[in-house]
Amino acid sequence: MTKPHVLIVEDEPVTAKDLRQTLMHFGYLVPPPVSTGTDAIRQAREVQPDLVLMDIVLKGPMNGIEAATFITLHLDIPIVFLTAYANDVVLDQAKAAAPVGYLQKPFQPTQLRTAIEIGLHEHQAKQRLRAAYQWMAATLQCMGDAVVMTDRTGRIRFM
């Protein structure tokens, strides 16, 4: 099995360096970190990482939530947010970006690894589910006969 690529988006150089060393110690492939939302999108397009660790507060006009939303919607790459901010407003904004994880700083290396592994697993499961759905939809559209699906109570759920 190939080692997962993890992109770090962090505007604090010391934190970015520490994260990179920790991830490489765990066996992940880690390109040089980036510090802005624009660079995050560019690097995600170029590298096609398996997962992005995204700080919420970044340098430049685009914050981490905006960059994560773009990456999730257009590149289908899972995001784990890293942040020192955990108020309800930030949490609600972060949820709208559909991350696979959210870690509040400071965190332990084992918590980081767990968030990455669970995020990768969840993303793979979603991809398998999406593929199965597309296959079933194509199969049903190609059938010449009518198909009626009911639930356990007998209500028609699909026709």
Image (cartoon, rainbow, N blue to C red):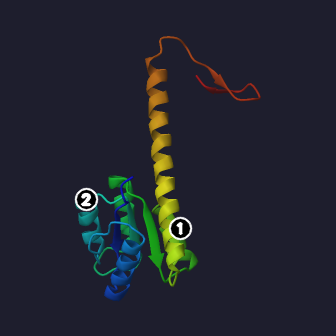
Residue 128 image position (x, y, % from top left): 47, 42
Q: Residue furthest top?
A: 145
Apparent side of residue 140 relative to residue 153 in the rendered image (left or right): left
Q: Decide which of 9, 23 is in the foreground and name it.
A: 23
Q: Earlier in the sequence, mark 1 or mark 2?
A: 2
- Asked where in the image residue 48 lies, by quadrant, the reply is bottom left
Residue positioned 46% across, 76% down in the render: 82
Residue 84 shows up from this direction: yes
State the SS at label 1. helix
Residue 35 image position (x, y, % from top left): 29, 78
Residue positioned 56% across, 80% down in the render: 87
State the SS at label 2. helix
Q: Residues within 10 Å of mark 1 (few under 14, many from 20)?
A: few
In the image, residue 88 above or below residue 128: below
Task: Indicate which disc residue 77 carries.
Answer: none
Q: Residues within 10 Å of mark 2 (few under 14, many from 20)?
A: some
Q: Which residue is mark 2?
A: 45
Residue 105 image position (x, y, % from top left): 50, 82
Residue 2 image position (x, y, % from top left): 36, 55
Apparent side of residue 56 relative to residue 38 in the rendered image (left or right): right
Apparent side of residue 148 relative to residue 70 in the rendered image (left or right): right
Apparent side of residue 25 relative to residue 117 in the rendered image (left or right): left
Amino acid bearing label 1: Thr
Residue positioned 35% across, 72% down in the render: 8
Amino acid bearing label 2: Arg
In the image, residue 14 above or below residue 137: below
Q: Decide which of 25, 94 is in the foreground and name it.
A: 25
Q: Which residue is mark 1?
A: 114
Marks 1, 2: nearer the viewer: 1
Residue 90 shows up from this direction: no
- Asked where in the image residue 34 lies, by quadrant, the reply is bottom left
